Structures are given as structure tokens and as C-alpha cells.
Amino acid sequence: MRILVAALIGVISAGGMWAYVSGHFSRAEPDDVRSQLAHYKEQAEKLSAELDQVSATANAAESQLNIERSAQKQLAAQVKALEADNTRLKEDLAFFESLLPNATGAAGVSIRRLKVETVVPGQLRYRLLIMQGGKGDRRFTGNLQLLVTTLQDGKSAMMTFPAAVPAEQEKFKLSFMHYQRVEGVLTLPEGAAIKLVQARVLENGQVRTQLSANL
């Protein structure tokens, strides 16, 4: 817009000069020339003021648009967070509902829930809920073991977690009175397709309970 006004002012000025050179103003009085120049100047100032007003309106509209875009992004992030919270609440509800019959159930350890999902290729997230039935008057101490059946290059293979590394084995230790939640991420070989995940609860090296889940 400023370029347009500048161009108009230039045209006006050029027109005045041409008129002067051609003799249009040669017979005019100096007061008439000053009056015409004042008129052109007034028109130029008017156009400049209109330009400033239009620019201010455009800037305000652009600022409002940026605010609306930012608000839209924030709302999208809030919706995503609320959806995640809702999923977690549903899982918690199912968890507490599963607690109700447990106090009067048969004594023993069981895996009440096993959930597995692929995070990114080569990584598997697992979540378990392990519970002890009956009165739960003794602390259960044992270990969790995960067996992952994969298919790679057309061949089936089974991987056992944790590996024979003390730091890894520490993550799979179990110790609870009533229940224990366990979750983590397993790293698998590149290109391995996961077929089956089996969770086992061991006590003194013996399998107490197990549960499988397909991906």
C-alpha cells in the first residue's frame, strides 16, 4: 500500500511538473500555483493517512489470526492430554474394579492384566497388573519373566527378558502384599516382527502363573 501511495504521489508530482513545463501554469499567478501545490499536498497526506489506517487494520487482523492459531494449537494439545487422561482413568477404574472380588478370591498369585503395544519399530511397551488373592497376609517376592516370540527373515525365534545382566534383572523383581503394577519398554532386533508375548511370574525359580497376549 505504501508503494502505491508513493507511486500516486509521484504521478501527482510528475503531472504538476508536466503542466508547468507545458505552459499550463505559465500564465497562472503564483498564488494559483501555490494553491494547486497545496491541493496536491493535501491529497497526498490524505492518502498517507488512509494507508496508515488500512495498515493498522491489517496488522490487527493478522495479530488476531495468529492468536486464534495459537489458541487452536493449545486446544488440540489439551484435547490430546485429556484423551490420554481418560484412557488412564478407564484403566484405573478397571484396576480398582478388579480389586473388589480379590479379597474373597482364592489365595495365590495371578496376572490380572497384560497389555502390549509397539511404540516404534523395534520397541515393545508392556504393562502388567499382578495380584495376590486371599487375605494377602504375606509378602510375595519373586521375578517377572517375559518371553517374546518373533518372526525374522522367515524364521521364528523366542527372546527371554530380562537378560542375564544384574541391572536388567533388578527391573523385573517383584515384591508386594496385594498387587504390583509393572511396565517398561523392550528393545528388539531390527526387522523382528512380534507375534506373541508371554508373561510369567516366578517364585524361587518356579512358574507360579502366566498369561499371554498377541500383538
Image (tube, grey):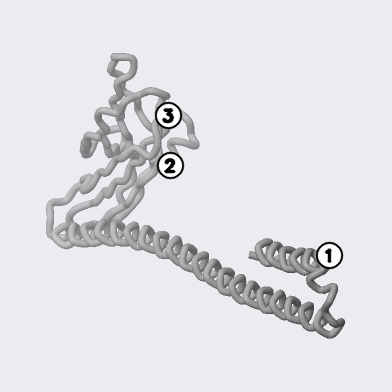
Residue positioned most to the bottom: 31
At horizontal 63% and vertical 64% (from top left) the residue drawn is 1
Residue 183 in picture, x, y percent from top left: 36, 46
Residue contact between numbered discs 3 and 2, judged by CB atoms under 8 Å: no
- Would you identify the image quadrant in which residue 189 lies? top left
The label shown at residue 163 is 3
Q: Is residue 82 above or below residue 168?
A: below
At horizontal 83% and vertical 65% (from top left) the residue drawn is 21
Residue with the mark numbered 2: 171
In space, the residues marked 1 and 2 are separated at their CA atoms by 95 Å
Residue 106 in picture, x, y percent from top left: 13, 51
Which numbered mark, 1 or 2, is in the foreground of this view? 1
- Would you identify the image quadrant in which residue 35 lies? bottom right
Is residue 134 toward the left or the right of residue 168 in the image?
left
Q: Residues within 10 Å of mark 1 (few under 14, many from 20)?
A: few
Residue positioned most to the front: 27
Is residue 177 toward the left or the right of residue 33 in the image?
left
Under mark 2, the amino acid is Lys
In depth, the one of 139 and 42 nearer the eye is 42
In space, the residues marked 3 and 2 are separated at their CA atoms by 11 Å
Residue with the mark numbered 1: 21
Under mark 1, the amino acid is Val
Going from N to C along the chain, the mark reached first, 3 or 1, is 1
Quarter of the image with the C terminus is: top left
